[in-house]
């Protein structure tokens, strides 16, 4: 993978991750705001309870207020639990994405390593082919010189024999 493609892929993954994290943080912020609202309701209910007149024996409003406080606290606990579950799910998703990114990076490294090894093997094969070609050329030249030398020697012998025959 060349450097330009590598940078393009890194940029793509970075933008994708930033977008996903931004969306997840938006959801978490909404849940946090809902919990803060519930907590504020709980506080206002708790503050208003002591301000009631102590001399009155009205149990109905007091019971009602206690029930509202209990419902508000239950609601807050439920929102906190939902928030915790959402955070855990997002953490798991982030871990999975990280594992996938590491696996992809390892795959890219392995592929690059295989290409390097293949390139080295092909280079060695080319060197062997070049050496074989050189040896064949040398053998051909030696044979050609040997044939020429042999032919020259034969001609010389023939000439000697002819000159002896003529004497």
Image: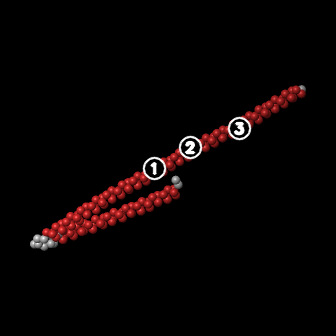
State the mark number for residue 140: 3
Could you tell me which secondary element the residue under label 3 belongs to?
helix
Q: Quadrant of the C terminus?
A: top right
- Percent across and percent down for residue 125 are 59, 42
Instruction: Indicate whether 130 appears above or below 103.
Output: above
Which mark's residue is nearer the viewer, 2 or 1?
1
Mark 2 and mark 1: Cα distance apart in space: 22 Å
Taking the view exactly as shown, the residue that stands out farthest to the left is 55
Q: Which residue is mark 1?
A: 106
Marks 3 and 1, how far apart at CA? 50 Å
Which residue is denoted by mark 2 in the rendering? 121
Which of pointers 2 and 1 lies earlier in the amino acid sequence? 1
Tell me residue 2's x, y (percent): 53, 54
Q: Residue at x 21, y 67 (%)?
A: 68
Q: Which circle's residue, 3 or 1, is located before the other in the chain?
A: 1
Identify the residue at horizontal 38%, vertical 56% (top origin): 94
Relative placement, left or right, of 31 versus 57 is: right
Callout 1: few (<14), some (14-19), or many (20+) C-alpha neighbours within 10 Å?
few
Q: Which tag is nearer the camera, tag 3 or tag 1?
A: 1
Contact between labelled residues 1 and 2, with CB atoms less than 8 Å apart? no
Mark 2–mark 3 Cα distance, whole angstroms, equals 28 Å
Left or right, 166 with reference to 89 = right
Mark 2 vs mark 3: give the one in front: 2
**Local crowd size for mark 3, using a 10 Å CA cut-off: few (<14), some (14–19), many (≥20):** few
State whether residue 109 is above or below residue 12.
above
Q: Which quadrant of the figure has residue 134?
A: top right
Q: Residue at x 61, y 44 (%)?
A: 126
Disc marking residue 86: none
Q: Secondary structure at mark 1?
A: helix
């Amino acid at each position: 993978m060349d450097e330009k493609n590598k940078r393009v892929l890194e940029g793509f993954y970075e933008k994708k991750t930033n977008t996903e994290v931004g969306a997840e943080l938006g959801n978490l912020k909404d849940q946090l705001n809902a919990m803060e609202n519930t907590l504020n309701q709980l506080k206002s209910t708790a503050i208003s309870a002591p301000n009631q007149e102590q001399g009155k024996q009205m149990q109905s409003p007091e019971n009602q207020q206690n029930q509202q406080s209990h419902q508000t606290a239950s609601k807050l606990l439920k929102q906190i639990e939902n928030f915790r579950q959402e955070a855990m799910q997002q953490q798991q998703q982030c871990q999975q994405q990280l594992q996938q990114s590491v696996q992809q990076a390892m795959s890219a490294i392995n592929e690059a390593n295989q290409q390097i090894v293949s390139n080295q093997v092909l280079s060695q094969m080319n060197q062997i082919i070049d050496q074989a070609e050189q040896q064949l050329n040398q053998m051909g030249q030696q044979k050609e010189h040997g044939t020429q030398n042999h032919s020259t020697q034969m001609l010389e012998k023939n000439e000697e024999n002819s000159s002896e025959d003529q004497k």
